[in-house]
Structures are given as C-alpha cells and as structure tokens.
C-alpha cells in the first residue's frame, strides 16, 4: 500500500497546475492530515464541524479549510470560526445565518453554491436553474460572498455516468459568469472525487475533492 505522501505526489504530478487539490479528510486523524499538508496539499475539506475543530486545533493555519459536508444552521457559529470557505450553501436561510455569524466576528466568508446536478430529490443542493436567484439574494447580504459552484453528482465511480452532470454544472457556472453579478465571482468550480476527478477536470473543474485516493479506503462509510 502506498503512503499518503506517495499518493499526493502522484496526484499532484497528474493534475494540471491550474487545478487545486482539496484533501477530503472526513474520518482522518490530525496526524494523517498533517502528512497530507507536508506532502503539498494546501486545502483540507471537512464534512463535520467537530472533526474539523480537532484538526484545526492540532494543525492551525498550516492549511486552509473548506467545509464540504451538509451544514446545519446550529453549527454555523462554530463553522465560521474554523473554515476559510463553505462549499455547500443551498438555501437563503443558511446564507442568512452565515452572514449573521460572520458579522459578529467581523469576517467575510466566501461560499460556493451547491448544485444538485443529478436532480436527486434526496440530495442537497439547488437545481441549476435555481442558482441564479439564490446567488442574487446572497449578493445583497453582508459578510458573505459567492465565489463559485460545487457539485457532487450521482454516487457512482463510472466516469461516463457522471460526465453529463459535470457538463451541466460547468454550463451553469459559465452562464453565471456571463451575468457578471455585482459582488459575485465565479472563480471556483469544485467537482470530482477519487473515482471521477479526471472526468471533472476534463469538464472544467478548478478544484477536485479527493479522499480515498489520498488516505485509503475509509473504515466507516459516512458520507
Ligand atoms: C468524502 C467526500 C469526497 C471524497 O470522496 P472520495 O471518493 O473518498 O475521494 C469529496 N467530496 C465530498 C463532499 C465528500 O463528502
């Protein structure tokens, strides 16, 4: 089995320089995350606020932290203290809470809008056609600014099954960029995981979120 360091060196040599590797670190220990940072990862993706706090307390500002899980409003106060960016905003209620809590600590939070590109009813995120209206509302709020889009796509490892969902999200991203909304940037398009990052990069991802291919298979599958 390869080490975390070897896995990261392999990935960094493979992905274009314009694409940023986010290490998806759910269930991983601060020691494992530290090795990833040593090996050259600059952004850590965390799904759980409590787990992220443990990592942050151990490693501090040696990396940036992206929240990539589903954020409950009662966790926002803690989340805005730890995270540099929240990738999974999908409602105005969540955005309002982020805006309010960031205002209290005089912080500006960049966020991504999560797109439910698979249009799966049980999944989080907004449908592509709902993104513009949500972004326009968020752009009116203080202490929060939209920096791009994120999508998961349907849960599959098959590159060609996920491709259309990445294509659709990229189309949405480009269209929003054309609108050039005040206070809104389309800098980050976060899509692709261990089984799909190559396809995501081909379809225009600027950030890929990779867990298994860095850290190995998770003991407990807690997506
Ligand atoms: C776990 C997770 C990933 C990484 O998944 P792998 O298949 O382990 O690479 C990416 N994005 C999100 C939102 C995740 O929860």
Image (cartoon, rainbow, N blue to C red):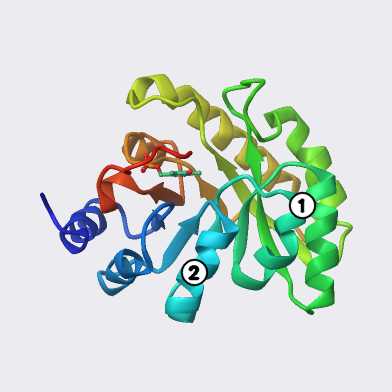
Q: Is residue 102 left or right of residue 35?
A: right
In this view, the residue in front, 150 or 97, is: 97
Q: Is residue 43 placed above or below 58 in the rendered structure?
A: above
Labels 2 & 1 near each other (Cβ < 8 A)? no
Q: Is residue 5 left or right of residue 19?
A: left
- 2 vs 1, front mark: 2
Residue 42, position in %: x, y?
40, 69
Residue that numbered label 2 is attached to? 54
Residue that numbered label 1 is attached to? 73
In this view, the residue in front, 100 or 170, is: 100
- Number of numbered discs visible in the structure rendering: 2
The disc, 2 or 1, on the residue closer to the chain's N-terminal end is 2
Residue 155, position in %: x, y?
45, 26
In this view, the residue in front, 116 or 105, is: 105
Disc 1: CA contacts within 10 A as few (<14), some (14-19) or many (>=20): some
Mark 1, secondary structure of its residue: helix
Q: Residue at x 77, y 52 (%)?
A: 73
């Amino acid at each position: 089995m390869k080490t975390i360091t070897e896995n990261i060196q392999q990935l960094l040599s493979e992905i274009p320089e314009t694409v940023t590797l986010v290490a998806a670190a759910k269930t991983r220990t601060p020691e494992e995350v530290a090795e990833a940072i040593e090996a050259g990862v600059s952004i850590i993706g965390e799904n759980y606020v409590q787990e992220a706090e443990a990592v942050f307390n151990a490693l501090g500002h040696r990396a940036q932290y992206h929240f990539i899980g589903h954020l409950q409003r009662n966790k926002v106060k803690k989340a805005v203290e730890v995270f540099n960016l929240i990738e999974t905003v999908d409602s105005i209620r969540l955005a309002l809470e982020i805006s309010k809590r960031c205002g209290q600590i005089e912080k500006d939070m960049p966020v991504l809008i999560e797109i439910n590109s698979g249009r799966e009813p049980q999944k989080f995120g907004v449908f592509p056609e709902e993104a513009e209206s949500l972004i326009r509302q968020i752009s009116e709020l203080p202490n929060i600014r939209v920096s791009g889009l994120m999508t998961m796509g349907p849960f599959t490892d098959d590159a060609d099954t996920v491709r259309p969902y990445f294509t659709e999200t990229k189309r949405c991203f480009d269209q929003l960029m054309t609108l050039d909304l005040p206070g809104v940037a389309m800098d980050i398009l976060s899509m692709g995981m261990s089984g799909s990052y190559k396809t995501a990069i081909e379809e225009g991802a600027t950030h890929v979120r990779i867990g298994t291919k860095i850290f190995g298979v998770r003991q407990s599958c807690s997506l």
